[in-house]
Each structure stands twice: as C-alpha cells, then as structure tokens.
Image: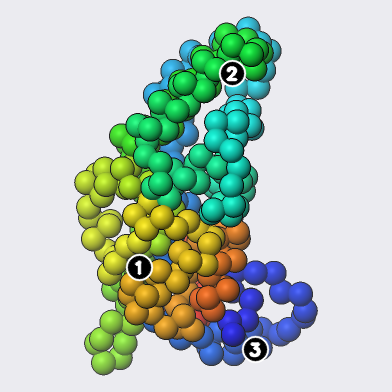
Amino acid sequence: MFIRVLGGTMKFKVNFFMILMLFNTIQAKDLIWDFGGIVFHPDKLGVGRAVGLQYFLLYMVMDLKNPNVQNDLFKFLETVMPADKKFGAVGAGDGQILPTIMRHWQAGTLLAPAIIKKTEDHIKKMDKIGYFESHYEKELIRRITRAMFDPKILAQNIYPIQAGVDLLKKCVAAKNADGTKKNNNYGGSNMDPLSFKISKKLYPEIFKLFDGIVISGDIGKVKPDKNFYQHLIKEFNLNPKNSVLIDDQEVNAIGARKCEIGTLILRDWDYKRLEQELKLCGAL
C-alpha cells in the first residue's frame, strides 16, 4: 500500500531522516503525467478574446456584474443536461466540479459539435422562460459556450509551461548507472478527443516525449475514476507500486491511490520541490 505522504499533508511529526527513508522505499519506474496545470496551461484571456472582450465589458457595465462568470456558466450548463453519476465528480483546474455535460465532453461521449448545438437550443428554451437576467448575460453565455467547446479555439489557447516541459525532459533523459532508462513517462489526462488531436499537431515535440498517452476522450473514462487508472495499468502493463501520478489536483489523486499508484501533487507552481520529490522516489 502506498503511504500517503507524497503530495499529501502529513498528520504526524517525523524527522527528515524518516521522510527520506520513506521516499527511498519508492522506486518510481513509470511516471504518469497530467497535461493541464503540469505541462500545459490554458490561456483564459485568449479564450476571452475569442468570445469577444466587449461582451464581458457590456455585461459588467450594463448589468453591474463581475465579468468572471464561471459560476453562472457552470450553473447554466447544469440545466442543459441532467446530473448523472456515470463519471463521478470531475474537478476543474481551479477546484470546482465540472457540470455533467462537460464530463461527457471530456469522456468523448458527447463531441463538441453536438454540445454546441445542444447548448444553443437550450439557451433559446431558457430565454423563453426568463432564465437570463438580461440580454447581455444571455449573449455572453452563448458566446462563451461556443468558444469553450470549439476544439480549435481550445487547442490554440493552451501553452506549454516551460518549467514543466523541462522537468519532463529531465525525467525522459534520466539514466541508470548502466546506461538504461531510469523510468518510462506516460501521459494520462482528461481531454476531449477533438482538441487533443489538434494539440498534438501544434506541439509534436512535446507529445513525442511520452512513451504512451491515454486521454479520457479516447477511452470514455475520466479522472478521478479508478477505471481511468486501471485502463492505464492494463494498456502499458504497469506495476502500480512502481508507478507515480504527477498531477496538480488532489481530487485526481483519489482514484490513483485506490489503484495503489503513488501520487505527487504540484502545489503553488513549485517545480523545484516537485523535482526534489522525483529524485527522492528514484525517478531522477
């Protein structure tokens, strides 16, 4: 059983020697990298430009509302598709839970064109019953849903995190004393299949660093569901006790730990600490 000290909060006091000994009992041979928040970061301003910054401004000035509409957007999206338990609670990058329709999007069970049409039709329906407080709110929600589910817009508005890419390269290049590879590196992330396909074309030099990749949209399973990790284990013939998930969300570690996969959680963009933890568990 993997002891929850990697990426977690220690609930008891131990000295540094004990921590070092614990890390040294972990021999991480297979690293599973999340994409968003570790290797790539979404450009929210870029998506905002695709929406049209003037629509945020009109909403703010005319309705006297905060232009950060994510809460209202998620609330609306929950009315588009009834809640179900198929994929469980899937976290957004900021810790919020994704609406049901977005979970299906990331699982590939609903593709972007169908979702855009579904949300457009639902906006018209909800407008008739007075759901929106104003024309400006309705227009902003409509334009955001068009942009956020457009695979081309989404793929063009993620950018590599240099510190994350550099750390990935170090792990790929790491060698044992006899010159053999120190570890294997796999991608394991929640992403819809259409934007992933475009992203691979935009950043081939990054995606080719991985020994294999599994995304939720290709397998119909979404983190933190343990079935996602079980698919990874089977696909790449991994030994869970020698595997470590590298992620930025604690919620995603839950399923991994159920499968006895170790976890390292990136906190506060501290890649130096993450690198030290990788060294302590034998990956570097």
Residue 212 sits in quarter: bottom left
Residue at (40%, 26%) from the top-left corner?
117
Of label 2 and label 1, which has the lower sequence position?
2
Instruction: Tell me the mark number nearer the camera, choosing from 3 and 1.
Output: 1
Q: Is residue 38 above or below residue 240?
A: above
Residue type for callout 1: Tyr
Label 2, label 1: how many angstroms apart (C-alpha)? Answer: 43 Å
Residue type for callout 3: Phe
Looking at the rendered structure, the secondary structure element under dot 3 is helix
Q: Residue at the right extreme? A: 12
Q: How many marks on residues? A: 3
Label 3, label 1: how many angstroms apart (C-alpha)? Answer: 31 Å
Residue marked by disc 3 = 17
Query: Which dot marks residue 136?
Result: none
Residue type for callout 2: Met
Rendered location of residue 43, percent (x, y) = 43, 37
Residue marked by disc 2 = 126
